[in-house]
Amino acid sequence: MARLVTVITAVHGPSAEYLADAYKSLLEQDLPHGWDWQWVIQEDGETDDVAPHVPDDARISFGQGRHGRAGMARTMGLSRAAGEFVKVLDADDMLPPGTLARDIAVLSGRPDVAWTTSRVLDLLPDGSTVGFDQDPLAGPIERGEVLAHWKAHDFRAQVHPATLCVRRDLLLALGGWMALPASEDTGLLLALNAVSRGWFVEETGLLYRKWPGQSTHQAAHSHEIEREARMAVIQARAESLLALENWRLDAG
């Protein structure tokens, strides 16, 4: 049997139309010999709006569940994840060719690395792209580095959680994505960074679509009181995990 990387996607009605582009980007992935992908699509809700947009492919597993936002949908989707690695792909984004192969190469070849992130290009409505000018150097990301940068830069990490590829066992051990209305992926990224070593891939690993309907464009996402609460619990969790891991290493 082929070794699997599970691509996990949370989707709701307004973003379902973009699943065709995401699927096309998966079909364009050239995986190492002996590997294949599984695509777990989990609807955040139980409507009739998403299923018509799900491609007919035996490698795709589609599920539905009660509305709880993206973090809960992804975590529910983990129940069907069969791959040893789990790759995040939002419904409205796309993977450039070679992305999965690069993630697999790092995680297969470096047992000391638990997760990867990669360079992102924002995909604007006119089809143009814009990069991020503060990418870290390619290579390892040591424990605590993302947390330190995030705290020093108004809660903005130097790597993008939407590019995450992670060992499934560690993802499950940390409980999946945080139970937050937003920033649940940042919370997971910082938790991973607190307990394990990561890796930054310098090649572009995500086309991040910018469009008016995405959740980060909604007014609620920037609500000051909620944002402060989200950042506080993300930071407290990451710092607690970092201290716990330091204690474990000292005790060992």
Image (cartoon, rainbow, N blue to C red):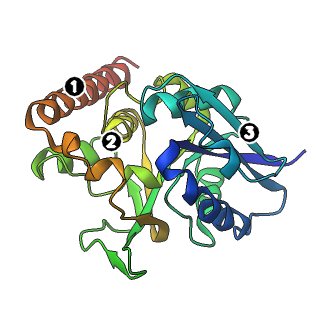
Who is closer to the viewer here, 226 or 231? 226
Who is closer to the viewer here, 245 or 173? 173
Residue 168 on image: x %, y %: 60, 35
Binning the other alpha carbons within 10 Å of mark 3 as few (below 14), some (14 to 19) or many (20 upward) gives: some
Which of marks 3 and 1 precedes in the sequence? 3
Q: Is residue 7 left or right of residue 139?
A: right
Q: Are marks 2 and 1 in contact (CB under 8 Å)?
A: no
Q: CA distance from mark 2 to mark 1?
A: 11 Å
Please state which amino acid type lies under the numbered disc 3. Ser
The residue positioned 16% from the left and 36% from the top of the image is: 227
Who is closer to the viewer here, 183 or 16? 16
Binning the other alpha carbons within 10 Å of mark 1 as few (below 14), some (14 to 19) or many (20 upward) gives: some
Q: CA distance from mark 1 to mark 3?
A: 32 Å
Q: Are marks 2 and 3 in contact (CB under 8 Å)?
A: no
SS type, badge 1: helix
The answer to which image quadrant residue 104 occupies is bottom right
Who is closer to the viewer here, 21 or 154? 21
Marker disc for residue 186: 2
Please state which amino acid type lies under the numbered disc 2. Thr
Please name which of the two marks, 2 or 3, marks the residue nearer to the observer: 3
Whether residue 131 is situated above or below residue 57 in the rendered picture: below
Report the residue that reaches farthest toward the top: 251
Q: Which residue is mark 1?
A: 233
- Residue 114 in sight: no
Q: Which residue is mark 3?
A: 61
Report the residue that reaches farthest toward the front: 48
Whether residue 190 is situated above or below residue 127 in the rendered picture: above
Residue 66 on image: x %, y %: 52, 22
